[in-house]
Image (cartoon, helix red, strand yellow):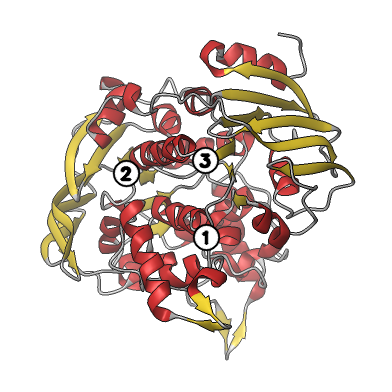
Amino acid sequence: MSIPLDLEAVAPPAIAPILEVRGITKHFDGVQALRGVDLEVRPGEIHALLGENGAGKSTLIKIITGLYQQDQGGVLVAGEPVDFTNVRTAHRAGVVALYQELSIVPTISVAENIVLGEDAPSTLGFVRWKELRAHARAQLDRLGQQINLRRLAGGLSPVQQTMVAVARALSIDAKVLILDEPTAALTDTEIEGLFAVLRSLRDEGVAIVYVSHRLEEVFALCDRLTVMRNGRTIVTKNVSDTSIDDVISTMVGREQSEMYPARGTGGGDVVLSVEGLSGRRVSDVSFEVRSGEVVGIGGLAGSGRSELLRLLAGAQKTSAGTVQVDGRAPVGRGVGRALDAGIALVPEERRAQGVILSAPIADNIAIANLKSVSSGGIVSQGRILQLAKRALAELQIKARGVRQPVGQLSGGNQQKVVLAKMLARNPTVLLMDEPTRGIDVGTKAEIYRLIRELAATGTAVVAVSSELPELIGLSDRILVMHEGRISGEVDADGADDELILNYAYGRDA
């Protein structure tokens, strides 16, 4: 993704911070989540808060906004100590957090969403709609957004929903705005629009805390950054005084060059044979994958990469073509038949398609492995716990235990649960769609290691990725798609960004 640098962004002068965090500690069930964390955010700056999943960022944000109470330490706003007992008290002090899963109510209007949580203007119990909409319009105008106030919020695009959430924060006079992965569902053009809004808010004096795993965004947008690791704040720097490589080394304690394990031989027998496969977008795709091989699938958004994996996994109907595993008869339609044939898919949208957020880790892993945890149609809780505990140990899933709901885990650990669920089936072919999207660099390295360990045992891995360094660093061989077809094949040892992009745009290399 190419994001224009904000060349006018400079570190603000050393003025008094609007938000201060001093010596915050927090325990959960004997686990030390935060260890004396310090943070200062100045008015009129965009301050990046960085760290691996599990570093303590989310816990810190929840303490700052009143969702959690710290064990020790304090929070100050505009130099005054505060003790937020809930989110509402934080809002009254002008501290607002917007999370990746926006708290937009889809069945009410844009205007109502903007004033949600406030006292609506009314007379004798009747809402003064004209006044309410005028207030909502003023907030959108401040952001330069022309969104229909009467429209139901559920019909908005992701970036419009984000703007409505920001407008709500402005309507309660936010002095500190905390954004958690705000660009996860946005296109490059939408990201640029959001950045323009955030810069204008910074220029108005709003302090913005920006949490993102996309470091190129941080360097395009932010003034300063603070890195957390293992529940501590490690360093705070001006963005102009550091580099992406330095930040990664600080976050994970190792160089970026150590992210990708050595490639394997990948020279086994053909285990996946695809012939003339077609779907809605995919057209006449043929290729083979050998045991122990990691095959990357590249291409632009809309090229058919994700659809190809869904067709292979039986999650989408084919219109033509065959899929064979280990030379056996073509795999029938349906996810169940594909799983029985040895094909398992780790989907791109893990929260919506890969896990049940409200269910425990153990149940999530068991649900795809009922045959192995039951006898005579009776499910064994003992087998479920044994399977889940083994997964926690082997994949190093950071959790309080196997009964913890998946929704309480970090994004990287949620991805590991999805992976554990599929690995418990001992698949012949593992399909992974954007395996590290929304995951910090440290957990990315763990996922890469797991993929290479699987390949070393003979599992064939097919992985879609939008990140060219990941495609090249992880794969043995790369298939590039353009408009539903394979436009080129690249050996990873000789691959570079330019070669892959040429194929992605349908040009001869």
Nearer to me, 224 or 448: 448
Q: Residue at x 70, y 8 (%)?
A: 509
Name the residue tied to disc 1: 102
Callout 2 secondary element: loop
Query: In what element is the residue under mark 3?
Result: helix
Percent position (x, y) of residue 33? Answer: 20, 58
Front position in the image: 229 or 14: 229
Asked which secondary structure carries label 1, the reply is loop
Whichever of callouts 1 and 3 sits on the residue coming sooner in the sequence is 1
Tag in front: 1 or 2: 2
User: In this rendering, is residue 363 above or below 22?
Assistant: below
Q: Earlier in the sequence, mark 2 or mark 3?
A: 2
- Disc 1, disc 3: CB below 8 Å? no
Q: Is residue 318 above or below residue 82?
A: above
Q: Depth-wise, is mark 2 or mark 3 nearer the camera? A: 2
What is the three-letter code of the residue carrying label 2? Glu
Q: Circle 3: is it few (<14), some (14-19), or many (20+) Cα within 10 Å?
A: some
Q: Residue at x 19, y 46 (%)?
A: 39
Residue marked by disc 3: 197
- Residue 217, disc: none
Vertical side of 52 occupied by 258: above or below: above
Mark 2 → mark 3, Cα distance in angstroms: 27 Å
Residue type, numbered disc 3: Val
Query: How many marks are shown on the rendered structure?
Result: 3
Residue 108: x and y in percent read: 66, 72
Q: Earlier in the sequence, mark 1 or mark 2?
A: 2
The N terminus sits in image quarter: top right
Residue where numbered disc 2 is placed: 52
> In the figure, 123 relative to 463: above or below?
below
